[in-house]
Every structure is written in C-alpha cells, then in structure tokens.
Amino acid sequence: MAPTKAPDSSRRSDRSRRAIHDAALALVTEVGYRRTTIEGIAARAGVGKQTIYRWWPSKAAVLMDAFLDLAGRSAEGAGSGEEAQSDEAAQGIPDTGDLVADLKLVLRATVDELNDPVLEAPTRALTAEGIVDAKLGAEFVHKLLDPQLALYVTRLRAAQEAGDVRADVDPRIALELLIGPLMHRWLLRTLPLTHAYADEIVDYAVGGLAPRP
Amino acid sequence: MAPTKAPDSSRRSDRSRRAIHDAALALVTEVGYRRTTIEGIAARAGVGKQTIYRWWPSKAAVLMDAFLDLAGRSAEGAGSGEEAQSDEAAQGIPDTGDLVADLKLVLRATVDELNDPVLEAPTRALTAEGIVDAKLGAEFVHKLLDPQLALYVTRLRAAQEAGDVRADVDPRIALELLIGPLMHRWLLRTLPLTHAYADEIVDYAVGGLAPRP
DNA sequence: CTTGCAAGACGATACGTATCGGCTCGCGTG
DNA sequence: CACGCGAGCCGATACGTATCGTCTTGCAAG
C-alpha cells in the first residue's frame, strides 16, 4: 500500500506557495482558464513543475487554493475602508431590524463582488469546473458557498422571530430565492447584474408576486 | 481577404452530421466532457477528423448542435405519450386559470429534465462552457434558454391580466425568481432537486416570504 | 471534374513522471 | 556550542504520451 504520497508539509516553501497562487490567478484573468497551463503557472511563478504536482492534484485544485487564499487575505483587510459592504458578506449579515434593507445591502455587495474584474475570472472558472466535476463542485460548495449561505439562514431566522418572515418558511429555501436569481443572471449573462436588480429580487421575494388582498 | 471558409453546405453529408451528433452526445455521457476529444468523436462516428473541423469551430459547438438536434427531435415526437409535461415546456405553459398549479407543473417538468441522465451530462457541459466562454454562453442562452423563458413571460402576463400577479411586477424578473433557484440548486448541487422543491419555490415566489397583514 | 469525404501523417503544446544538483532544515555527536 | 550528515523540498529539465488543429492523399458522390 505504501503510498507515494505524504510530502512533509512542515518543510513546505511558503514563498513558492504564494508565488504559485499569484501566478495562477494572474494567468486565469489574463488568458482564461482553458489556456492556463500548469507549465505556464510554474514558469510564471519561477517554480519547478514538480513543486505544483507535489502539492496539488489538478489545475482546478491550485486555483481553488489560490482563490481561498485571496478571499482570506481580503477578509483580513476588513473594516479598513469604505468597502464595508464586502465585509458584511464575509462576517455576517447586519441586523438593523429592517429585513428588506439589510438584504438589499448584502445582495448589492454580492453583485459588486461578482462584477469585480479581479474576482470574476477565477470565480467563473471554479464554478464551471465544479458544474462538470461533482467532486470539485462539492468542495467548492463546502468551502466557499455554504459558509456564505449560513449567514443568510441566521439572518432569516432572526427575521422570523421578529415576525418579518412567516414562521413556516424554510430559511434554506428562502435564501435560494434570493441568491438563485442573482447567480442565474451572472452565470448565464442573460441580462446585466445591477444593484437595481438586487433590490427588485429582494422586494419580489419578500413581498411575493401575488396581489395583497 | 478571401476567407478559407465557405464549404458548400448543399453537398454536406447528412449521414456524417448525424453520426457526429450521436457520437458526441454518447461520448459526453459516457466519459465526460473533458475526456471527449474531437478525435474520439470522429473515430466513434466513423468520420474523418477534418469533416468535424470543416463544419464546427470547436468541441463545444459540436455539442451545442448535437444538443439542439436532440431537443428538436424530442420535440417532434411530442403528443405521443405520457410525457405530456415535457411537451408543455417546449410548446407553451398551460393556462388552466390556476397560476400556481400551472407553474408547478412546468417546474416539475424542468426538474425531471435536469435529472434525466441522458440530458444531464451534455447540459452541464454546455452550461459550464458557456459560463467561461462568453461567446458560446450567449449562443447557448439565445438558442436554448431564451425561447424557454419567453414562455414564462407569456404565462405571467396572462396571470397579470387575470389579476393573479400584481400589475407592477416585471415578468422577466418574476421568471428568474422561479428558474434561478432551480438552476442554482442543480448547477451547484447544494441539495437534491425534487418536485417538492419545485413546488415550494412556486409557493414562496408567488406568495412571498412576509406574513400577510 | 469539382468537392466533400475517410484516413491518417505531421508539428505543436501540455500533460504527468522521473531525475538531477543545490539548498535548507533537524538532529546527533564531540 | 559547533559541526557534519542525511532527509527532503526546491528549481530545472528531459522524457514519453495524448490531443490539438492543419495538411495530404486517394476515393466516391454529385
């Protein structure tokens, strides 16, 4: 059985790891995912090919780690500027007592993130890869998406206790009513993804389509 | 300028075209999109590689045509059996006067299509490709998605005239409130895609999350 | 006799593996 | 405390395989 695996992670070069992350993200945004190659990443990072193959099983895995690293770094630099919105999404949905306003704030921040040219290419690449590769998709959902969605559940439960949402509503489904349309429009590029759209989604989802009696 | 293009389509072999379609679809479902190769398609179809390169610009384009062909064929064989649901989706959303019931019927049919093992692999492959490749994505949306969505617009407008949906609702956004969550769950595999889920989405979207006063 | 067709040779990449010195650690001896 | 030694990651690169997209050839359909 003796696995050829088990490189000693304590001896791992942090310098190389970061260089690989940066090179991967840069190449993906510059030439696209398809034309990003392991050899290209290695060359750009000034790193041996084997160093990549030693630590990652696939191109997608490299990009996933690089992306997590990026997200982690941008989350650290929180509370430091005008982009209070992004921080909310990473650290919790605000609860001002006004559910509609809170949701609009967060969904607008999500729209901004999806439209961010730095994040767009890698996010699309990872999402697309996850759609076709179930294993990678599960990892993507577990590491990146689920933590985000949990924040919505929390906020929606609070809304239920405050009487702003019906008690029989499943927060998990309610959240998808908000996120689903956003992602749908972004992924398929059916129409531009704007703040106005985020607002409308919140209004429609909370209020429903049917007329009030 | 003289483009190397312009093969004479009147002399094109229909036999080869169909064989290529079939081989492409079969290979995608059998070994996945990544490992289907142009050479593999050609071999399986009993066709020269050049015959593929002559008529299609990319692997994705082949699959797109094959998929359209498949959809077209299954649409032709309509009204012939128990799968009345799928036909509705292809030919129009029923209008029984009960908006919620009509939408549930159609969304359930969509769930069935997405869960159909024959359609799943090629649909995922094309969608994923379109997410990364904007040009192909636009073609995908225009040829496959938009026609479907137009049916929802029609039905929702009728509902507005019947007073089942508020007059100030934008049907285009209302439709995304229904389709978005479905596609989100299917694409990202967050949770199983069931009839029950389709029903809940319709209930939530039409009725809204907020309590009735 | 023009043109698509099947078959496949061809150069170009990229893949993933295997080595090669070089360098840096941890550890044990004096 | 110093010194040396082995283990293991590092950058680099050669290697064989796979797939790409183009090009060539002979044949058969139109």
Image (cartoon, coloured by chain):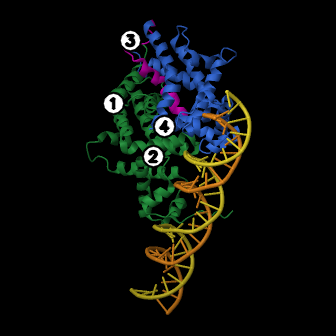
Chain colours: A green, B blue, C orange, D yellow
Give the CA separation, mark 2 to mark 3. 43 Å
Relative to B149, residue A183 above or below: below
- Compared across the picture, whether D26 is left or right of A48 comes to right
Rendered view: B181 above or below A86? above
Say which of marks 4 and 3 sits in front: 4
Badge 4 marks a residue whose secondary structure is: loop
The quadrant of the rendering that contains the N terminus of chain A is bottom right
Task: Give the image quarter of residue B212.
Answer: top left
Q: Give the residue number, with chain letter if any, for mark 1.
A: A195
Marks 1 and 2 belong to one chain: yes
The chain carrying label 1 is: A
Instruction: Give the magenta range.
Output: B162-186
Q: Do the residues labelled 1 and 2 touch (CB within 8 Å)?
A: no
Amino acid type of the residue tagged 2 in the rendering? Gly
User: Disc 2 or disc 4, which is closer to the eye?
Assistant: 4
Horizontal and vertical percent for residue B34? 59, 44
